[in-house]
Image (tube, rainbow, N blue to C red):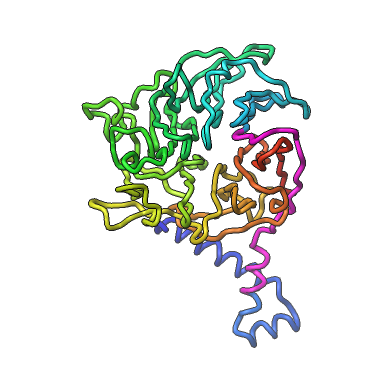
Amino acid sequence: MTSRASRTLSGAVSIALAVGALALTGPAAEANRAAGGTASIEAATRAAAPAVPDLRVRTIVGGLSIPWDVQSIGTGGLLVTERDKARLSVVRKGKRRTVRFPRSSVWVSGETGLMSIAVDPRFAKTRRFWTCQGWQQGSAHDVRVSMWKLSANERKASLVRHVVTGLPTTSGRHGGCRVLLDADSKALYVGTGDAADPANPRTLTSLGGKVLRVDRRTGKAMPDNPFADASDPRQRLVYNYGHRNVQGLAQRADGSIVSIEHGSYRDDEVNAVLAGADYGWNPGPGYDESVPMTDQSLPGEQTEAIWTSGTPTIATSGAAWTSGDQWGAYADSLAVAALGGERLLLIRFDAGLAQMDVATPPALQRYGRLRSVTSLPNGDLLVTTSNAGNDDRILRVSPR
């Protein structure tokens, strides 16, 4: 904690204690003085502590199959991807409509299909959005990020260009893939999986097991990327490396970004997204998943996670930050979906991204596997379920 933050916190506590002491009169004041002021401290602490909000959970739309992501396109509309069906949809007033796009070109295998979405902040004018998906051309396939334009009647999405291509694939396992538009620049962040290939995470010329940072329109490396001067154009895209399977990216109001990653049999991770950092996943030779998620025996410096699940994993996935005073004790928390854990975690961090505490609201422990989390402008959250079948849902979570 900075000295300025410490002084601010100290001053706030002093004011709270003073108010608490003034509130105690008569016998209560006598009891407080006899207890050395303990009662006033406890009273002030209780008065200052934000309340835990009740959470109202509503189904926005059902009848979905493994919805991987959902994002707002404004005016009440939602854009939704379904991984295995390679289906893109617009949802309005609880009704789903399929959007025509080249879904036959989407490569679906294992954990790979039609996955993440990012929507242009100026969508009302540009109609543009980005997706990350498996892609096939003849017998070849990869994972790629593509930019699209949605028609005014919301019935068709036209390809503008493929922004990033060549994310590695094998069987479809560990296909990633999460995209995030940086609120502070023209950058697009792309979290990728290692394709279950032990060479990918630490090979800087591979795009697997990385967080990439590219110009959102052209796909070129941002000029201040840590490897922007590398001779290999693929390495120029790399922002950090040593990841197993990045499933989430979320940007806090202060601009800091975190990634959420599937662990092996242990240690799902939340990581601070830092330039040039090595997060220490190295399952080679072979694909030895008994190694630590962050292996400190490797050469160089490995960056530890800011939160881990421990053993066993709960398969953390998408995430978003809560915003607004209505969240009370859950305000400014990272809301993380868990697939295997079948819950939503609300993890609080301090200003320096040190973990403070974790809550798991019971209201979000009755819907099975949870995949993606999106924050709406009014502070509500959208959460998708991922229960293999045809009755997955988009949930709206409102604190009250």
168 relative to 382 in the view: left or right: left
The spot of residue 218 in percent (x, y) is 40, 18
Look at 56% across and 25% down and name the residue there.
119
Q: Which residues are magenta?
A: 41-69
State the residue in front, 130 or 50: 130
Residue, far left: 231
Look at 61% across and 38% down and name the residue there.
374
- Magenta residue check for 64: yes
Question: Image height check: is 349 above or below 217?
Answer: below
Q: Quadrant of residue 69?
A: top right
Look at 48% across and 23% down and name the residue there.
135
Q: Quadrant of residue 116?
A: top right
Asked whether the viewer can see residue 150, the reply is no
The spot of residue 243 in percent (x, y) is 39, 44
Question: Image height check: is 237 above or below 18?
Answer: above
The spot of residue 177 in percent (x, y) is 48, 35
Question: Image height check: is 347 above or below 104?
Answer: below
225 relative to 399 in the view: left or right: left
Q: Quadrant of residue 144?
A: top left
Look at 37% across and 40% down and name the residue there.
197
* Numbered disc total: 0
331 relative to 247 in the view: left or right: right
Residue, far bottom: 34
- Magenta residue check for 222: no
Quarter that holds the N terminus: bottom left
Asked whether the viewer can see residue 148, the reply is yes
State the residue in front, 315 or 32: 315
The spot of residue 229 in percent (x, y) is 23, 28
State the residue in front, 291 or 57: 291
